[in-house]
């Protein structure tokens, strides 16, 4: 995959926090992006078999190398115009959250390496106010590239792919606790569901952020208050739950800052991400991550929090 395009910047050295390899694609002349780590393959549009009684944005299925893959019409989902020459359109085959899917787009332009600090939150009015479809925007060679929240796209089309609150509800009656949790998740959709799940699990004292930089500013304030008042840090923050991919500051950079601080380093950090594999676990551990869980394992997330703070 990485040999198909040239990156637009230098990768960081091993042991440093990572930036983002972003694949740029277009729909109706607008530029969008997806993390290359979620991409398995790109290919020219193929013949597909329509499916009856499926979601309107599912074009059908096809079978590359023996695997049945659903094709999602991303222009239709984004409420953007279809291309003038569909035969020249592209499929982006992805795998994340243990789900394989193909996204139908118009063109694939290339790959770029960017720093998370160069990614900003999307405008509240972009694409008719549907900002929750995007997790961030960045500018490359004068073009605005909008990063799509592909987890939300899959959930909107098939809710069974998202966080299953029933996993928490089925765990029985739980006592409420005011132990403080910090949650860092850039996706509007996932952050809302995560907060709902934690509330159902009895965690009533959750402070949330949509990027690592704002979370770090809050944690610095916590650190200073603890030093001034001689207060144990766990009284202020019992655990940090963070995603990896986030604008302004990613979860690994946030982890490194926390674990390098003499006061804050005692706080356990749990990474909850759709991109968890052995390599990511090893990388996260090198920064001080205490536990890794893959979305959408919300039941396991709650039990892991229980182990660390109860």
Image: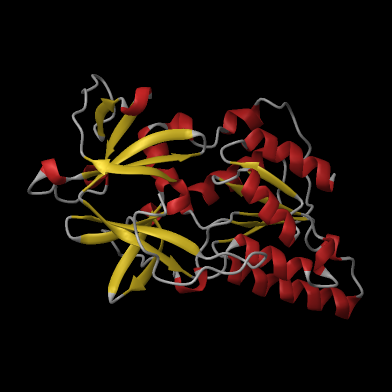
- Residue 240 visible at all: no
Name which residue lies at 60% across and 71% down.
214
Name which residue lies at 87% across and 80% down.
228
Colouring used for the render: secondary structure
- Could you say which quadrant of the image residue 87 lies in? top left
Figure check: 131 above or below 216: above
- Residue 269 visible at all: yes
Position of 264 compared to 104: left or right? Answer: right
Question: Residue 165: image x %, image y %?
Answer: 58, 33
Depth check, front residue: 27 or 161? 27
Q: How many marks?
A: 0
Depth check, front residue: 223 or 1? 1
- Could you say which quadrant of the image residue 252 lies in? bottom right
Depth check, front residue: 242 or 12? 12
Position of 192 compared to 237: left or right? Answer: left
Figure check: 113 above or below 298: below
For this orientation, the residue located farthest to the front is 3
For this orientation, the residue located farthest to the left is 84
Question: Residue 46: image x %, image y %?
Answer: 20, 33
Name which residue lies at 48% across and 62% down.
20
Question: Residue 35: image x %, image y %?
Answer: 44, 54
Question: Residue 109: image x %, image y %?
Answer: 26, 59
Name which residue lies at 31% across and 60% down.
110
Position of 145 compared to 59: left or right? Answer: right
For this orientation, the residue located farthest to the top is 52
- Could you say which quadrant of the image residue 33 lies in? bottom left
Figure check: 306 above or below 49: below
The quadrant of the rendering that contains the C terminus is: top right
């Amino acid at each position: 995959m990485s040999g198909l395009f040239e990156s637009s910047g230098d990768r960081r050295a091993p042991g440093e926090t990572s930036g983002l390899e972003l694949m740029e694609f277009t729909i109706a002349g607008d530029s969008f992006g997806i993390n290359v780590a979620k991409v398995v393959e790109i290919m020219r549009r193929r013949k597909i078999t329509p499916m009856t009684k499926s979601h309107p944005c599912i074009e059908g299925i096809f079978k590359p190398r023996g695997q049945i893959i659903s094709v999602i019409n991303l222009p239709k989902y984004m409420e953007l115009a279809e291309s003038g020459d569909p035969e020249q359109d592209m499929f982006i085959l992805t795998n994340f959250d243990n789900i394989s899917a193909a996204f139908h787009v118009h063109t694939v332009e290339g790959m770029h390496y960017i720093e998370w600090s160069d990614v900003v939150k999307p405008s509240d009015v972009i694409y008719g106010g549907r900002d929750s479809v995007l997790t961030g925007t960045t500018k490359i060679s004068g073009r605005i590239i909008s990063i799509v929240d592909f987890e939300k796209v899959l959930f909107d089309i098939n809710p069974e792919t998202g966080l299953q609150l029933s996993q928490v509800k089925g765990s029985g009656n739980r006592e409420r606790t005011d132990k403080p949790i910090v949650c860092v998740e850039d996706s509007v959709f996932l952050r809302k569901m995560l907060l709902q799940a934690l509330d159902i699990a009895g965690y009533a004292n959750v402070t949330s952020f949509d990027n690592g930089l704002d979370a770090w500013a809050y944690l610095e304030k916590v650190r200073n208050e603890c030093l001034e008042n001689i207060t144990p840090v766990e009284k202020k923050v019992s655990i940090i739950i963070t995603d990896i991919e986030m604008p302004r500051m990613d979860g690994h950079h946030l982890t490194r800052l926390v674990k390098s601080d003499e006061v804050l380093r005692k706080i356990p950090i749990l990474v909850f991400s759709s991109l968890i594999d052995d390599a990511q676990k090893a990388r996260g551990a090198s920064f001080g991550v205490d536990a890794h869980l893959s979305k959408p394992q919300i039941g396991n997330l709650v039990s892991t929090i229980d182990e660390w703070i109860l």
